[in-house]
Amino acid sequence: MKLPRALSRPVTMDASGQRNWLYPQKVTGYFSKRREWVSWALLLFYLAVPWVRIDGLPALKLDIVEQHFIIWGTTYWPQDVKYLVFVLIGAAILLFFVTSLAGRLWCGWACPQTVFLEFVFHRIENLIEGDRNKRIALDKGPWNAVKIGKKLLKHAIFLAVGFVIANTFLAYFKSTEEVLEWIGRPPYENWGAFLFMLANFVVFYLNFAWFREQFCTILCPYARFQSALVDKHTLQVTYDYNRGEPRGKVKKAEGDCIDCKACIRVCPTGIDIRNGVQLECIGCTNCIDACDNIMERINKPKGLIRYSSEAQMEDQQQRLIRPRVVIYASFLVILSIGFFWSLAVRPLVEFTIIRAPGEPYTLLEGKTVSNHLSLRLLNKDQVDHNITVKVSGAEDARLIVPVQPFPLPANSLKRMELFVNIPQANMPSGKQAITLLLFSDDREIAESSTFILGPIL
Ligand code: SF4
Ligand code: SF4
């Protein structure tokens, strides 16, 4: 069956490179209803998380400026970057796994761009300007009082919603208290924060009010490499060309497709799924519902457009378990085991030893070698510790610490200067290995080794 060729340029662009503004029609149906439930749950989650506190700490705060992340009441410092690497690699492999099984499930069901655009901004637009035909007529019509009023109202609401979305996004990086304080202050008191918030807000507003589906069809890199992740057994939103073609008007059509174009009118990226799987298809399922509604009306079985695979279209057996699926799943399992194991054994107090700048050693009276060391202590624990430092590994080594024990508050970084003194006679080679031990109320909680340097005898 020969299908029409897809356009070689994005649907949202005409031959001269100008934007083709899309007017997706509202659709109802089995998948739309479920996607709506998922979207409301995700929106609620997005808006609520920055306000949730666990033991007084934000449930999620990715503070890049202060160099720490708080995730579900636990603070992660730059020293924990390996966990972030685990999470990022895990998320990428999970995306590969899901894509190889069911195509762009993420894009159609959970991507913030789709959720905000389709279930927030398109809804507002529909409410104010009406569905597709009314919106087209309004845009083509003259700039009279009704049109100006509707456009002003729509953009005023877009601005208000964009403001909430953008500042909620900020609250994932700064706490809600800080963001509210920034909002409440006049701009001249903190131009840096004001301009950052303004830029963030303008980007969100322009994206959803103007740039829209072009983010998916032109910008998003995922669409570009998804073709490398799918094969003929991957489930995707597919037009059943065996059943649908040859298409034609009702009663004249030999196939089931009556060429009503309902599937195109509801498509948020403006494509014709009958041209085959395309890069612009975000798997939103709108065309499934639109076509099912038409099939119901003309008394034909539903599913002319459905979740299916190339293999099913060619009457081959659908295989769920394939080498690529097994490889992605295996990587995911191995990575998850490694991640949870490393989290379980994650030390809650860590320290690094840094040699103080200048001469590596001082020779004191009585032939004692003294090294000035600097400790960088990090308490990732939720409780305060009372720290005592001890030294081992060298005979007659003595530690000079300004104060012992000293407090190390929960979730804090501290620097402590100390000296290690060793009789020169005990280190004739000029180098002596030592271990510094950290005790919290007589319980050893961390240790680290270094060398004490001195003159060679
Ligand atoms: S909605 Fe169904 S019947 Fe109508 S054009 Fe699309 S595939 Fe054909
Ligand atoms: S072709 Fe269908 S599934 Fe793909 S983006 Fe358009 S409406 Fe959504």
Image: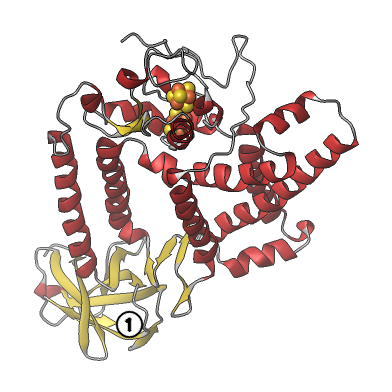
Q: Position of residue 5 (x, y in %)?
A: 42, 10
Vertical comparison of 132 with 161: above or below: above
Q: Residue at x 59, y 32 (%)?
A: 24
Circle 1: residue type: Val
Residue 220 visible at all: no
In this figure, what is the number of numbered marks?
1
Q: How is the image coloured?
A: secondary structure
Front-most of 118 and 394?
118
Q: Quadrant of residue 411?
A: bottom left
Q: Residue at x 14, y 82 (%)?
A: 396
Q: Quadrant of the N terminus?
A: top left
Front-most of 442 and 225?
225
Q: Position of residue 362 (x, y in %)?
A: 28, 69
Element class at badge 1: loop
Front-most of 256 and 319?
256
Q: Quadrant of residue 444?
A: bottom left
Q: Residue at x 73, y 39 (%)?
A: 129
Q: Identify residue for label 1.
A: 401
Q: Position of residue 292 (x, y in %)?
A: 43, 35
Vertical comparison of 420 with 406: above or below: above
Neighbourhood count class around disc 1 (C-alpha, 10 Å): few under 14, some 14–19, many 20 upward: some
Q: Residue at x 43, y 40 (%)?
A: 108
Q: With 258 as the anchor, is 141 left or right in this view?
A: right
Q: Position of residue 228 (x, y in %)?
A: 27, 27
Direction bottom: furthest residue: 441
Vertical comparison of 298 with 339: above or below: above
Front-most of 191 and 229?
229
Q: With 272 as the anchor, is 83 left or right in this view?
A: left
Q: Quadrant of the C terminus?
A: bottom left
